[in-house]
Image (spheres, rainbow, N blue to C red):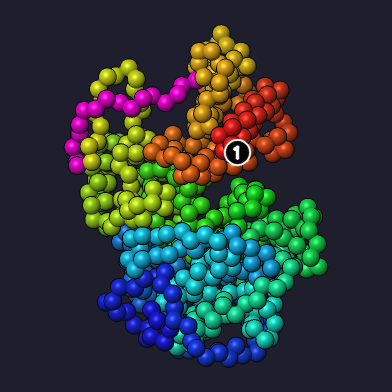
Amino acid sequence: MRRGSNFSISNKKINPESPVRRSSSKVDMGTKTNKEKPPVRRSSSTTDNLQKRYPSTSHVEKYLQHYADALRLPTGFLKTIVKGYKSIDSRLWLMENSSSMKTRDGHRAKIDAQLKHIKREDGHSRWAELTQTVDFHVKMSARCFIPTKFWLVNDPGPSVGPQRFAVAWGSHDDVKTERTIALDMMNRVRLDTDQIPLARQLRKIEKRVREEAPRLMSANKVVTVILCTQGRQTDEYGNEGSAVMKDLVDSLEALSKLPVKIVVRLCADDEKAIELFNKIDDKFNSVDVLDDYWGEAMEVHLHNPWLTYGLGIQRLREAGLTSSLIGQLDEKAFNADDIYKFCQEFFIGEKEVDLPHPQNSLDAFMRGLDRLLKNEKLQWNPVKKKLTPWIDMKQLERQFRPRQQSIPQQQQYSGNGGQQNRRPDAPAKEVPTSSQDLTLVQIIQRWSHKAPDNKRLNTLQELLCTVPSVFPPTNTKVEPHDYFGKVPNFSEEAFSGNSGDDLNQLLKRAVRKMKFFTHPDKLPEDLTDNQTLLFKTIWDVIQEQEADTLQK
């Protein structure tokens, strides 16, 4: 929708990622100061003034549907989107505008009109990457009337504009002006401040949300806080260090205890920043940490390669409009029940469709899912770099059906509602760790080295995918511990069909996640000697093979 168009729905298809035509004249930014209303929308009573302020629920739902269609999302997903919208009292984007955001390691998307091709453009500044993301959400906030405040970490000064600006915060009639100010403001910001006092601003937000907490809880509403940062933190004087980073974690922890949903949108590939926010993601259930579209797609692919991570999913996660289940796609391999719930939520919603549970009848589930997919548009797959269905049915079946080396023929879903006979794929590498005749060292060696001479390490992808095979209960030589359940479990299918730089990028992502949980400094203090030996060996072996594979 171009700036200045009316607020009605048209039949014309929109490209939600298209650039907005900028105003050639400067917009009067007003005289807003920090002494403004809290970033929490007040309760909407039944007074005439407030009825005029907000469009009706049915009006908003039509806009959400229009937007979901433009993002090529399944029609059944609208129920989840509307549920997310109704749960939000308001949103607050806290955006880092420090000099660190000038670093040119960012990525922007070049998108065709129908989202059928999405090219990654490298060499942009981190702020340029963030601006493209925020432009999308400014337009979405305006079209769907989602009360949203945008809050810069550093005051840009009166010559540039206000530190805080909003969209859909006032009356229905103000939204076009608010959108114009927000979009122009993102282009006017100067990145000339070294300080990055994220914790200080988060404490201000926490104080204001805390004041509204009783009302929010009684209304069953949340404030969605989207923190956009390259990850490095200073205090207001520019000091860095462990105490400053602890202050950031503490401020996020205090905020997470309130009725909020927190999304962290990282704008850099800095290893230390990623490690810090991975800790935060692991520690707080109310926090969803997101990379850029391509990085997040690889994270999801490593655990759930049967899913095409469409741009629409990324955008709705950034908006805080998805469920906690979808937020786990980049954290774990979905089991049968997770996949069933995902399909119900993503494709069916309020449709009267009977989709059998895969644990009751896998064939019936696959046939039902295949029928649903035939009604959906193909999606740009950022990992495979082509259009693919939302679900790769063959990969999904390989996840469900155990590979049976002893059976020469097996029934497999053919993709057309029927079955076909085929030879099973080569079985996954099995590590016979349960043998009572093997020592712990021998069990680990079976995992790490190629048989029969045990002179060469297994490939990096083999090592990464089979780490869980040396954990209890399969490995009876090591005592159980809850920490084993936190170590990532990567799908073998995630690496199949990839080669060259594409494979290396996936391996780098997987190694980063594995090293995060197996680093000697991250391990629990109550590990036994056997547990410590196991984790140390995993760390050493993967370090060695990473250097040989990725650092040649």
Residue under pointer 1: 551
Q: Main secondary structure of the magenta part?
A: loop
| Number of marks in picture | 1
Location of residue 105 with respect to 358 vertically, above or below: below
Q: Residue at x 50, y 16 (%)?
A: 451
Q: Residue at x 45, y 67 (%)?
A: 85
Residue 66 colored in magenta in the image: no
Location of residue 326 with respect to 168 vertically, above or below: above
Outermost residue toward the top in this view: 437
Q: What range is drawn magenta here?
A: 416-431
Location of residue 368 with respect to 47 vertically, above or below: above
Location of residue 452 with respect to 202 vertically, above or below: above
- Amino acid, disc 1: Gln
The image quadrant of residue 62 is bottom left
* Residue 68 visible here: no
Image quarter hosting the N terminus: bottom left
Image quarter hosting the C terminus: top right
The location of residue 482, given as percent across then percent down, is: 61, 33
Tell me the SS state at disc 1: loop
Left or right: where 10 falls relative to 428: left
The location of residue 186, given as percent across then percent down, is: 57, 76
- Mark 1, Cα crowd under 10 Å, few <14 / some 14-19 / many 20+, is few
The location of residue 296, given as percent across then percent down, is: 50, 52
The image quadrant of residue 153 is bottom right
The location of residue 373, given as percent across then percent down, is: 26, 51
